[in-house]
Amino acid sequence: MGWGYGQNEQGREIGYNVIATCDHPGCTAEIDRGVFYVCGGDHGGGEFGCGGYFCSDHQRLPNDVFLCFACAAEYEKNHPEEAAA
């Protein structure tokens, strides 16, 4: 069973059937709100993410989980040993 449609804890529509735009300010890229685009790897944001939805141009992969730029910078600040690798 997949996440075609649902709502997160804030009541925001989520799932791969929900067509949306990237949450990065000013970006108009069309995405869906499936786990591929969510910062942190799950709809709640996971351990290191914010739970926003970002296109591939606005994601980084510092810890084997896609994070938005702000969360990736915070992760790298708090885990410098991994950022140097």
Image (cartoon, helix red, strand yellow):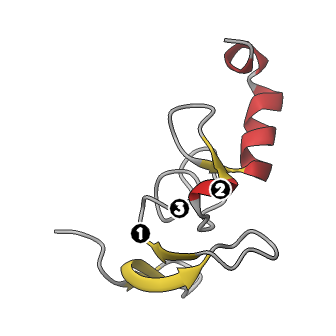
Q: Is the Cβ of the residue at disc 1 closer than 8 Å to that at disc 3?
A: yes
Three-letter code, disc 2: Asp
Residue 38, numbered circle:
3
Closer to the camera, 74 or 21?
A: 21
| Element under disc 1 | loop
Residue 1: which quarter of the image?
A: bottom left
CA separation, marks 2 and 3?
Answer: 13 Å
**Label 3: how many Cα within 10 Å (few below 14, some 14–19, many 20+):** many
Q: Position of residue 29 (x, y in %)?
A: 62, 75
Depicted 67 relative to depicted 63: above or below? below
Q: Residue at x 63, y 67 (%)?
A: 52
| Element under disc 3 | loop
Give the label, 2 or 1, closer to the camera: 2
Q: Position of residue 49 (x, y in %)?
A: 63, 52
Q: In this image, 64 relative to 28: left or right?
A: left
**Label 2: how many Cα within 10 Å (few below 14, some 14–19, many 20+):** few
CA separation, marks 1 and 3?
Answer: 7 Å
Residue occupied by mark 2: 57
**Label 1: how many Cα within 10 Å (few below 14, some 14–19, many 20+):** many
Closer to the camera, 30 or 84?
A: 30
